[in-house]
Amino acid sequence: MVPIQRAYALLRSGALDQTLLPLCGAEKLEAYRQRIIETIDGFAAQFGTDRQIAIFSAPGRTELGGNHVDHQRGHVLAASIDLDILGVASLREDRMIHVQSQGHPLDTISLEELEPDLEHEPHAAELIRGVAARFGQLGYPLKTGFDTYTTSAVPKGSGLSSSAAFEVLIGNICNTFFADGYFSAIQLAEIGQYAENVYYRKPCGLMDQMASSIGGVVAIDFYEEGNPRVEPVNFDFTQVEYALCLVNSGGSHADLTDEYAAIPTEMKAVAAYFGKTVLSEITFHDVMQHIPELREHCGDRAVLRAIHYFHEDKRAQEEADALARGDFEAFLRLVQYSGQSSYDLLQNVYAVSSPQEQPSAVALAIGSAVLGGRGAIRVHGGGFGGMIQAFVPKILLPQFCEDMEAAFGEGCCHVLRIRPVGGTTIWI
């Protein structure tokens, strides 16, 4: 760790630029450097200027393929992006953890009280508590507390996995301060998922944390529980004449946990009919041979979502293969098919509890009109509002962004870069 004034000097001199470039890209370097300085400013204002600090980063993620298959132990294709959460952290001498996220109340937890709080609605403090508790369960208890100030470029509730990035950030801080870097990126992702499942009480899969923690483009096979197989996919998105765009339609899935949770619940109900836990333990043939019985026992939507799973699971593997062999046009076709399946079968474009509000559906309609059959467009991530994803021919990018911003407001259209680095320590 370094004194705050030393950290300022290193940043302003450009001494850390080679570390920062993979995180933000050359075109955003100056803005990223300034954001780190502002995060240090926030830490100093909150916790004092006479501290030794370390700087951490954890990226948001984009799902390239495998919409809602991770919780069924299927295959996904995901990537980290150049929107991240920055954290400036310093050790304390007592057993308290203070995390001040810009624009939010201070989260305070005691290392003497690491049991889940089941009496109140979960919030960010529970994610911190869950990560800290898990380190202790795995043999690396936190010996002291720490102070952290964070700033986020990952929009909350947008489907870019701000919660997973936050978990990965806290996990990296704990791993650096208290475990001497013992835990791998995969293990830190699993720690984050534990915190979200057990402490935040959200039944998420592991894809979000994996993509944020590992970095780059990764194909993940979740079939073997507790031992996911992760394969980097080498493809340079900067070499194609398409831009990766994520459009924030103004909706949010932050308050739609029930809608989100119904997807794994219904998929697992289909698996349970066959005496199994998840859909990866049965076959597409099993489902198709028992449609009448499944409709009666599980309902029509569960049957449709199960059919989506099998198609989407295969598509995610085909997408990874297409990128690995450099066939970007084949990849785009598969992304488009994925979007149609999510709309028709998975049914996660809008919430049935609020059918009058369909911002993602409107965004998909506008984007499809601009693309005119070129590129690809689909709902992004968990769904039910928030983000859509599009691969836009660069020649159409100005029109695409203009039309989206006319509908959803300035700044809604994010042109993103795949980030090759996951959760990381910028300086220790």
Image (cartoon, helix red, strand yellow):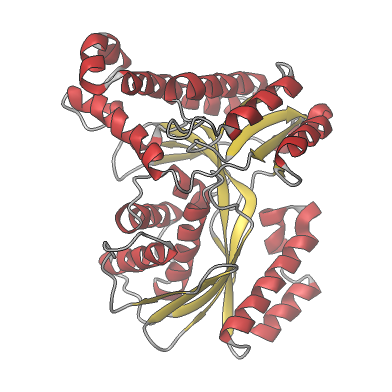
The front one of 261 and 12 is 261
Residue 418 seen anywhere in this rendered image of the structure:
yes
The image shows a total of numbered marks equal to 0
Image vertical order of residue 159 relative to residue 193, above or below = above
The one of 300 and 424 positioned closer to us in this rendering: 300
Relative to 16, 155 lies left or right = left
Residue sitting at the far bottom = 50
Q: Residue at x 49, y 25 (%)?
A: 342
In the shown orientation, is residue 162 left or right of residue 305?
right
- Work out whether 380 lies above or below 255: above
Residue 234 visible in the shown view = no
x%, y% of residue 145?
Answer: 41, 80
Most distant residue in the front direction: 356
Give the position of the C terminus as an image quadrant: bottom right
Q: Where residue 69 sits: x, y (%)?
A: 40, 32
Residue displayed at 40% across by 44% down: 257
Task: Say which quarter of the image contains residue 283.
Answer: top left
Percent from the top left, x then y, of residue 318?
51, 22
Q: Is residue 294 above or below residue 125?
A: above
The quarter holding residue 412 reads: top right
**Residue closer to the observer: 360 or 163:** 360
> In percent of the image, x 74 and y 47: which residue is there?
411
Q: Residue at x 53, y 48 (%)?
A: 157
Query: Is 5 displayed left or right of 155 in the figure?
Result: right
The quarter of the picture where the N terminus appears is bottom right
Q: Looking at the rendering, which quadrant does residue 313 occupy?
A: top left
Residue 307 x/y as whole percent: 37, 18
